[in-house]
Amino acid sequence: MKILYLKEIDSTQKFLKKLIRGKEVKAPFAVVSDTQSAGVGSRNNAWNSQKGNLFLSFAIELDELPKDLKLESASIYFSYILKTLLYEEGSCVWIKWPNDFYVDDKKIGGMITNLEANTLICGLGLNLVMAPDGFAKLDIKVDKKEVLKKYFTKIEEKISWKQVFSKYELEFYKNKNFFTHNQNIKIPLEGVKLQQDGSIINNGKRIYSTR
């Protein structure tokens, strides 16, 4: 994975999409910025920039993804791989369905995924050193470049969705006191049933991540 490090950008995801669309770079490729002025979060919400936090977007060709990974669950897959690495470093971080990083009951970051032609673009924001009101930061100190090196090495192993899901499934109970949103409808996660492909069943309706 080639990584471009920037001091400041409006949005790593918008910038990377533009590079891929204009064929200026080719996946696998990542963009990391010290700060960003117009970060994009879930449901097109703004993601506040705090210098020193992690602002990352990376591109992977669809043919390079695990064969058993359903695209709608890509945010779970890539979030959980990073969660596992942080956990091994001593963090208590966990993943709230489908793409939010939490420590205890506070959000510390999130992952969104988008398609650009035959390329999956993943955007990640993670509070490493500072957090705005209502949010929290990672509960351990990490070296940003070292974490990314390990993360992309792990991604290149093409771990199967089945392997990732088997571990994620064991921790899904942590969602029970939280909510998710689907088509602007707030859904309590306590009563949903997690499915093998990463979707959830709520009141008989199957819901996939749209992030």
Image (tube, rainbow, N blue to C red):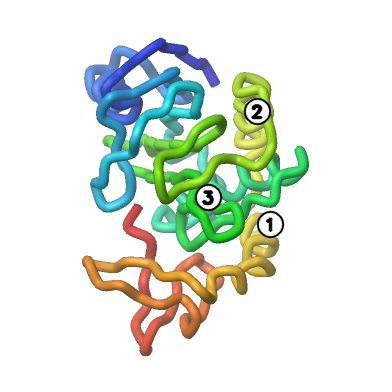
With 54 as the anchor, is 153 left or right in this view?
right
Q: Residue at x 26, y 52 (%)?
A: 43
Labelled pair 2, 1 in contact (Cβ < 8 Å)? no
Mark identifier at residue 163: 1
- Packing grade of label 1 (10 A; few <14, some 14-19, many >=20) is few
Do we see residue 101 in this rendering?
A: yes
The spot of residue 181 in percent (x, y) is 32, 66
With 173 as the anchor, is 197 left or right in this view?
left
Circle 3 or circle 1, nearest the eye? 3
- Packing grade of label 3 (10 A; few <14, some 14-19, many >=20) is many
State the SS at label 2.
Answer: helix
Mark identifier at residue 147: 2
The spot of residue 151 in percent (x, y) is 63, 32
Q: Residue at x 60, y 40 (%)?
A: 138
Please identify the residue farthest to the front as the structure is shown.
Answer: 133
Name which residue type carries label 1.
Answer: Gln
Name which residue type carries label 3.
Answer: Phe
The spot of residue 195 in percent (x, y) is 52, 74
Residue 109 lies, with reference to residue 52, above or below; the image says below
With 92 as the anchor, is 55 left or right in this view?
left
Mark identifier at residue 199: none
Quadrant of the rendered structure where residue 210 is?
bottom left
How far apart are labels 3 and 1 at the CA level? Answer: 20 Å
State the SS at label 1.
Answer: helix
Quadrant of the rendered structure where residue 161 is?
bottom right
Do we see residue 67 in this rendering?
A: no
How far apart are labels 2 and 1 at the CA level? Answer: 21 Å
Quadrant of the rendered structure where residue 95 is?
bottom right
The spot of residue 62 in percent (x, y) is 43, 40
Q: Label 3 belongs to which residue?
A: 101
Name which residue type carries label 2.
Answer: Val
